[in-house]
Each structure stands twice: as structure tokens, then as C-alpha cells.
Amino acid sequence: MRIILSTLMVLILPGVASGQFERIIEELSVAGVPESEIEEWADRLSDLAANPIRINSASEEDIAQLPFVDMATARLLAAARPFHSIEDLGKVPGIGGEAMTFLEPLIDFGTGLPTRAARSTRILISQNINTRLELSRGFESRDGARAFAGSPLASATRIRLSNGSMSAGWIGAKMSGEQIGWNPSQGRLGPEHTALYFEMRRTTAIRHVVLGDHRMGVGTGILIGRSARIRSASDPVRVVSSLSNGLTPHFSTARSEFFRGIGAEVAPSRRVTLSASVSARHLDASVGFTEDGQPFARSVGGTNRYRTGNEIARKRAVREQAGIVSARLATESVEVGLAAFHRELDTPLVRSTQPYQMFFPEGVRARGASASGRYSLRPLALTGELAYAGGWGGTGALSMIIPTASAVIAFRSFDKNYYAPFARTGAARSSALRSERGWYLGGTMNLDTRTSAAFLIDHYRHEWLRHGIHWPSDGSDLRIAIRHRPRRWIRLEAEARRSVTTTGTVYADPDMRQVRGIGERQRSAARLSATYDFSSILTFRARGDIVETDRSNGTLLAFDMRFLPTPGLILEGRIAQFHTDDFDSRVAAYEYDVPYAFSVPSLYGRGSRSYLMVMWRPNRVVDLACRIARTLFLDRHSIGSGHDLVASNRVTDFAIALRVRR
Amino acid sequence: MSASIRFLAALALVASVAPLSPAQPLDGDMRFAALGGASAAARHHAGPTANPASLPGLRRRTVTLFAGQGYGMHELRTGGTAAALPVGRAVLGIQGRAFGFDQYRETWASAEVAGAVFPATSRSLLLGARLRYHHTAISDYGNAGTLGLSLGIVMPIAEGVDAGAWVSNLNQPAMALGDPPRSELIIGIALHTIESVSVYVDAVKDPLFPLSLRGGAEFLPVPRFALRVGTSTYPETISAGAGMHIGDTSLNIAAERHRWLGWTPGISASVTF
């Protein structure tokens, strides 16, 4: 037992002590993983550190729990066992890459059954509080109509229990200005935002059940699910050649896509998985009324699906009931899936007479079905999905992965009437996938043992009109990234991007009449960063960004420091100066944040941004993190708008997070 | 140029420079002024435009005097002194500097401390902190002062390669209400990989201005004599200079040409004892 514990400590502590988890979170962010899922990774990484995946004996599903590892990768790893070190993993074709080195604390290279710790009851309780130190206008009491009902503090409490194959979680969250306590309008006690799930994983035929909030990923994600954002992906090949990972609990109060109901996966045989989800929830909607007082919806929100009782009472929302079924057959080289959804609203959708309005099925019902597949003939793989949802849509990708390089070419096409309300992929990032055609080319190369390069080209065209863009439009993205390690302790990263998009605009004709038209907008950005591990306890990072658009320019220079003065204590800080001509030339800069929080501020104008974070992990039970971040603007006298208006040229955000786990 | 035109031009120039501007052209040691002002990763450097962490390289007591004349106008003269005093494992520094003319006078007085630490490694990390009092006096208008804190580091990253970073006025002091606090973040690298040649490159970010790159090269044709050239992108300047080292004394001269405003000459002398 002592040997096992010692082994675990050796495996866990390097990651904890060096802040490796924060690097994984950052990599996930760069890879385009949505914010709400990154929030969940804070827990999952802790779980994995406490119970590393026994790579030499774990099931493919368990291996796929690791970050950056999908089912296809998990199968590759399972087939290539045994492994003795993280370097062995890197030798598996398609597994290489720097991301794998981050996984070392999460993997146990021993053999045998899971440890006793994995089967014991574990509890996690966390409390996050954050607030802005400068009071915004909404909190002034001089005008009752302006004052918020609650305090400016935002709070989130998380409780999670797990025992072997079962786990349950609850989050109660309060945003700035909301109340905690008895809420007479709702007739209930407690915070406004809640998320709840109960999950059971078994090795029997009923493999996985989630009761409460959950997500479903099917096939390539064009009908149901969400792929990583292709344009910001750090691995441009895997992001379009992977299939979704199925059912997962949604443990976040971030406004994002999830289902509220019950989801289940059944495996009648080793190769076959059947999944189903039934859910009911409210969606943000633009609701109007007919002359005889009947409600109708002009549009239904894409992402603002997180609605509390209070919000629903205050705003217009429609109730949605949805059912999803899917089946998957997976063998060593072939994976085939079928999926279908049915959605019903309590308020009918009515199309606008405006020609540029979105296309969606009128009425209360929407249905869709798809067939997806993946055929692996190493080193080649063919991935695709064909779907019907009011119209036809499909995607296909041919990828090749060899130890020193990978490449993919992919196509996608969706009819005018294709409407997949549960899909978030392709060029559409914040709304449902529709009316899009495009091709994609991506690749990675290991130029030598210390240098790797990645690129992607994505071209898309919207054959039909979109909101605010009154003509068919197109766009393209180009991204090139190079990583180089001249020494073991120095990491250089360079990245260049260029995007061209079509925007709606208004021209004046010779008679000075306003004419709607389209224009082209170009944006180029370059980033250079250098990370230097000065010693085992001290890391520096410098970063410079340059952004250029048709009309404006922006620059940012940042310097980061990470210091571990004693085991369990991490100090992290940044000083950044920025200067942009306008919002279009803004610079987004990822920042380390307290657990469960996520910070990528978009900096624009002229000013400086700095933060300091202290993370204290005195033992394996408690960790405490505290962060203060300040943005100072030299060209503004007020920040924000409406109730959030701060009558100052600086804003200071303070956050604290306490986590207890046993 | 008539006296009145010179006076107006001088006023316009000084008005364009905020009171907490980190430096004027050719402020400080002319060795680095000739290198385009790139000095963030330099060691053995004391002066108002130096990274405060550069002090520990000075093993002996050092006094530097410097003077310059912005664009050839006596109204834009700058001059001052910097002294470094090694005390135990630390180095203390003091500086004084004046800029302007009788109608507009800007004065700095600084105290700084720097030292080397070895965080879980045998390699040294140089740290420095500077506290500077900024004072501005405008004739028939008034005067004001404030304190600014600057922090810096210099570290080796490979054989013959140093990196440095420092931020000025970290506490973002303001001279008066509505006066935007000025703060610069400077990150630089110094290459000494070729014998007799050193190259310095800095990236400088002041929130009020676009990113500026500064760079320069120093060549020693003979051990005691150095030739230097440098450039910066914002403002667009080129610079050149020379230095001579005799015994405990060194003498450096530099000249900088601004794309529009012309030449600025400067001279500095250092004595170690």
C-alpha cells in the first residue's frame, strides 16, 4: 500500500506542484474547448490526478477520459499497449505532440486493477466568489429603479459526491445583482442558477446514465453535439477527423448548450452502444403576439439556454421538449453511427417576411436524422456524416496521421433549409449550423525533434442570406503556428492568422439613397511568445501580439511570472500593456484564473492589464486560490454600460476559490 | 531660427511629452543611447533609462555623468548623474536628472536597490527595484510631484544570451488629476555569442503608443574602443556612437537622428573606484 501511495504521490505531485493543470486548461482553451466544458475540466483533472488512468489496463472509454484523447485515439493507445513512460505514448502514430507531455501526472504506467482509492466515497465542495471592487451604476442607491436587488458579489457553490461508478453534483450560482435567499416571485429559497446531475457508469449493459443536466455528442457533431471551434484549434487535424464522445454530465452554470432531463447509454454488446436523451428546458426567444393574442416566436436563442425561473418570468422564453436517440457500432477499424432528434416547442416559430432572416422550420416541431461513420486504414482515416434536418447536410474528412506529420482535407455542405438546433460546429460559433458550404485543409509537421508546425485553411460560403448580410457571402481563415524548443527549458511559439469575412453594410447611391450591400473585412494577427523555465520553481513568459485590420491596428506586450516558493504555493502574475485603435483590432489574451473560472479578456483601447494570483495547496484536501486583476484605460472615463457602468478609468476584479476534497 | 520660434517649438515639444514620460532622447548612459535605447537585458548599467536589475553587474562603486541636447535645442537639454554602490550582496543606486529650461523644468531623483538570487538553481537571477520622485515645474503655472515604482529582472537564458524585463511606474502614479499615468513595459534580449560583438533588442510598450522595437549592435575593433549603431521604430530614429575605456574611466558619445526632428547629441562619462 505504501508503495502504491508513494507511486501515486510521485505521479501526482509534479503536476500539482508545477501548475501543470493550468497548462492543460490553457491548452484546452487554445484547442477551442467551450468555456463551460473547461470549467468542468478543473474537477476532472483533480479526479484524474487522484486516480490516474491505468493506461496499461484501462478500458478504451476510460482512456478517452483524458484531455486531448478521443475514442479513436483511445483505441490506438489500447492497441499499442504496454507503455512504460510518457515517451512511449509519443511513439504511437498520431499521439505525439507536446500536449501529451502535460498528461504525465494523469497516467499510471503500472498494471493491475484500479486502486482502492478509486472505489471509495469521495466528496468535493468548492466555493467561488468574485466581485468587482469598483461599484457600478446599478449598485448606487440614489435611484430605486437603477439599484440591483442583490449584492455585487457573484458566487458559485459546488458539491460533488462520487463513489466508484456513481457520482452526483450540484451547483448553486448567483450572478452579480442577484439575490440568495427567499425569492417571493419564484416562491423558492436559494440561488437563482442551479445545475444538478446524477451519473452512473457501469461495466454492465446499462453503461452510462445521467439524470439532470447533460450533453450529447454524436458523430461529427453536425446534427447533435459540439465540436471544437475549428478556426482556433491547436490541433487542426484531429479537430475535424474525430467523432464525438457521447454522453457527459454538464456540471456548469455557464450559459451554454446542455439538455435537462435524462440521458442513457446502453451497450448490448462490446461493439454496440445505444444512446438516448429526453429533456425539457426553456429557451430565450423573441416572442410576439398575433391580433387575437396568440403568442408566436420570431426566433429562438442559440446559446442563451440557461434560464432561471426569475429570468423566465422577466423575459420572453419558450419551453422546449426534445428527444435524441443514437446508435453506434465500433470495431477496430470501422465506426458507424445513426442519430435522430425530435424537438417540440410550446410556441410556434414564425418566419419573418424579411428576406435576410434566418431559415428555420416553421411551427412547433423540428426533426432530423443522420448517419455517421469513420473508417480507419492506417495511416488513413475517412470520417463523415450525412444528415437531414429540413434539408440535407453533410461533412466528410480524409485524414492521414504518421509519426512525423498529419494532414486532413474536409468538406461540408448544408442546404438552405438545413436546421440543426443542437449542433455547434463549422463556421457557426454562436448560432445553429445552417446554410454553409466550405472546405478545410489542415496539417501538422514535426520538422525535427524540437520544432513542430501546424497550419489550417478554412474557406466557407453562405449561399443564402444571413441576418444583416443581404447577399450571399463568403469568408476564409488561414492560420500557421510554429513551436520550437531550442533548449529543454525554453519554448518559443509563433502564430499568424488571417481572416477575411463578409459584412453587411449600407452604401449611399449617387442620389444619396441608402442601399444595402456587403463589404469585406480583413483581420490579420501575429503572436510571438517565449516561455522560459528559469528553474524548477520559476517560470517566465513574454508575449507580443500585433493585430491589423482594414482600418486599425493593435498591439499588446505581456510579461508573466510563475513562482513556486514552497511546495503547494503558486504565485502567478502578469503585466500587460495594450494599444488598439478600436474594438476590431482588440487582442484576446488568455490568463490563468482560479479553479472553475476562465479568463480571456478582449483588450481594446489604450491601457494596461495586470493580475496576481496566489494558489495555496497545503495538502491534498484543501486548496485555496485568490486572484486580483486590474485593467486601467488611459482613453476612457467610464467603463461598461447600463447598470454595469463604472464611472472610472479602471476596474478591479477580485476572485477567491476554496476547494475541499476527500 | 529666431528665439521666439525656438521657444514655441520647445514648448510644443515638451508639451507633447507627458510629465511622467520615462525618458527623453539620449537620456542616461550614452553607451545604450547609441544602441537605439535597447538595454533591458544589459548588465553593468546604471542610469535613469536602465533596467533597475542591471545594477548588480557593477562590482565597484561607479559614478556616471551624462548630458544631451534634444534636436540641438538648448531648451531641450538634459543632464544628470547616476551612482552605484555595492553593499554586501546588494547594489544601491541613486540618480538625479534635470530636463528642460527655465519655463519648463522636469526633475527626477531616484533611489534603487538590486541584487542576485538563485531560485533552486545555480544560475543567478538579477532583481531590481527603483523608487523615483518625478517633479515638474512650469513657470507662472505651478509645480507638482509624484512617486513612481519600477521593477525589473535580468537573467541568463543560454550561453552568451541574457533576457531582461522591467516595468516603469508600476504603481501608475499621476502628476495631477486627469494626467494619464505613464508606464512602460520593456522586454529585451542581449546576445554576446560572437566575440567583440554584442546585440541588444528590446520590445517597448507604452499604452499611449504602438509597440516599439529598439535594437542596436556594439562592435569592439580593439578591446578598449567600441563602435555602436542602433535604431527604434517608434519614434523612428537611428543612432550611432562610440566609446572608449581607459583605466577606471570610460567615455561614450552618441547621436540620434529622429526622422522628422533631426539630430540629438549626447555624452556621458563614468568612473569606477
Image: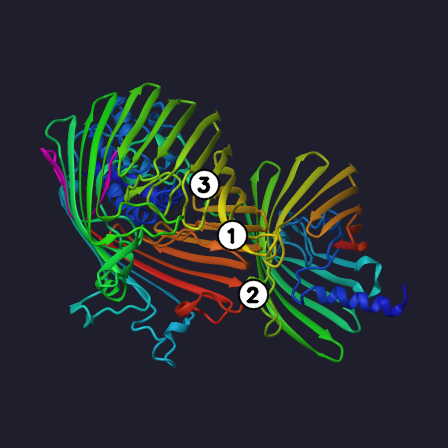
Q: Residues within 10 Å of mark 3 (few under 14, many from 20)?
A: few
Residue nearer the viewer, B216 or B231: B231
Residue A111: % across, % down: 21, 28
How far apart are the two marked residues, 2 and 1, measured between alpha carbons? 23 Å
Q: Residue at x 79, y 64 (%)?
A: B76
Residue nearer the viewer, B134 or A301: A301
| Secondary element type, mark 2 | loop
Q: Which residue is mark 3?
A: A472
Badge count: 3
Q: Which residue is mark 2?
A: B172
Q: Which residues are magenta?
A: A201-219
Identify the image quadrant of the N terminus of chain B.
bottom right
**Which quarter of the figure has residue A645?**
bottom left
Q: Could you tell whether A443 is left or right of B35 in the image?
A: left
Residue A120: % across, % down: 13, 44
Residue A304: % across, % down: 30, 54
